[in-house]
Amino acid sequence: MLTKMTLKMQTQLILAGEPRPRLAGAVTMPVFQSAMYETRSEDKDYNSIQYIRCSNTPNHEALHTKLAAIEGSETALVTGSGMAAITSTLLTLLRVGDHIMMQDSLYGGTQAFLTEDGPALGLSLSSFDASKPASWEAHVTPKTRMIYVESISNPLLRIPQLAEVVRFARRHGLVACIDNTFATPINFRPIAFGFDVVIHSASKYLNGHADICAGVVAGRREVIEKVRAKVTHLGGALDPHAAWLLHRALKTLAIRVDRQNRSAETIARFLAAHPAVARVIYPGLETHPQYAQARELFSGFGGMISFEPIGGVPAAERLLERLAIISIAPSLGGVESNITRPAATTHLGVSADERQRMGIGDALLRLSIGLEDPDDLIVDLSEGLA
Ligand SMILES: *Cc1c(COP(=O)(O)O)cnc(C)c1O
């Protein structure tokens, strides 16, 4: 008999959390489209009463087990979106007076929540350059509670000094929190590496089919149970049908991400060699500033590529107009390839000066590689760049 410990990732994706014995013999997890459940004599507190908003229906529970198995965490929680996971986690772990150190290039929604809502909640913030550990010490105050990073940043695909982040958090008694959306647990597993809390927008790679919004928080039971209570209060639970879609999609996560890693590397090398391309940013290219770290810590370099065509915004816009296969859309991580110009979409809310300072040129394009044949994607990009 195989124990859980001996199972490899791909087997966990298929088996972990599946009901045993199978429900009515069904080989797949059914969807329980029921808002409430009969009360049981053992239900002693509010959170044990089964209700969709309490994230404790059979579809939630099965998914929590599967997600914890692949993250290597004690437990996990799904939420109604990545932002529900992020805001609920921050509101659980931080209180009035606390200070948070946030990486200087966070996902726009996270950054906006912290800067726009943080002060009214009594939180103070400072942003730090995650590639320069020597500069971090200056940010620590007696009130600092958390250090928050993303495993691969958007859209410049920078990688923090991850081992240093964990060491720094330990040294100062901070909660080390990481948004692992871009790397996925296939390419990087932050819990085993020493992070306390891992967050995902499951709307991206975990679901991978661009048809739902969902989020994940994983970590120690004691912490995740508190986040679950917060999600119950705020109302950010995931709907059972979306939970079922995410559950189904997770079974192919490793296969999808492995293929996306390989296709993206091929396409990044094609772009880097193209005479009409000014620069390519991809963690798997030797020219990437954190290439050595990515090689050492990640099992794959991911499916995201950023690049800038020669000729500025007109050249970038011309390329977008000519694409036939790759769709022009701002999200990422799905089976369809998408491309977007961050200065005109995801980073439109950031001033031009600030974007320039961050290194996000107006002509920069961010490409999410899907599951189409990479040869066809190369033809599409070649015609766009011609
Ligand atoms: C999309 C995204 C989020 C937000 O997730 P939603 O599911 O859209 O709420 C958070 N972090 C990162 C890195 C993302 O890409």
Image (cartoon, rainbow, N blue to C red):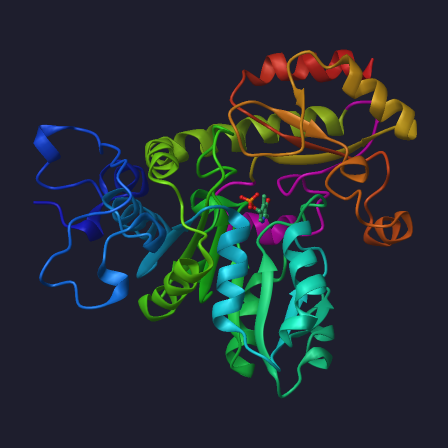
The total of numbered circles placed on residues is 0
Does residue 144 appear left or right of residue 251 in this picture? Answer: right
Quarter of the picture containing the C terminus is: top right
What's the residue at 51%, 25% (across, down)? 335
**Stretch in magenta:** 274-301
Does residue 245 appear left or right of residue 323 in this picture? Answer: left
Q: Is residue 280 magenta?
A: yes
Which sits in the foreground, 32 or 98? Answer: 32
Quarter of the picture containing the N terminus is: top left
Image spot of residue 196 (x, y percent): 44, 67
Where 158 sits versus 15, above or below?
below
Image spot of residue 231 (x, y percent): 43, 58
Image spot of residue 26 (x, y percent): 14, 28
Q: Is residue 327 magenta?
A: no
What's the residue at 81%, 50% (across, down)? 350
Which sits in the foreground, 380 or 89? Answer: 89
Image spot of residue 122 (x, y percent): 64, 77
What's the residue at 38%, 41% (across, down)? 239
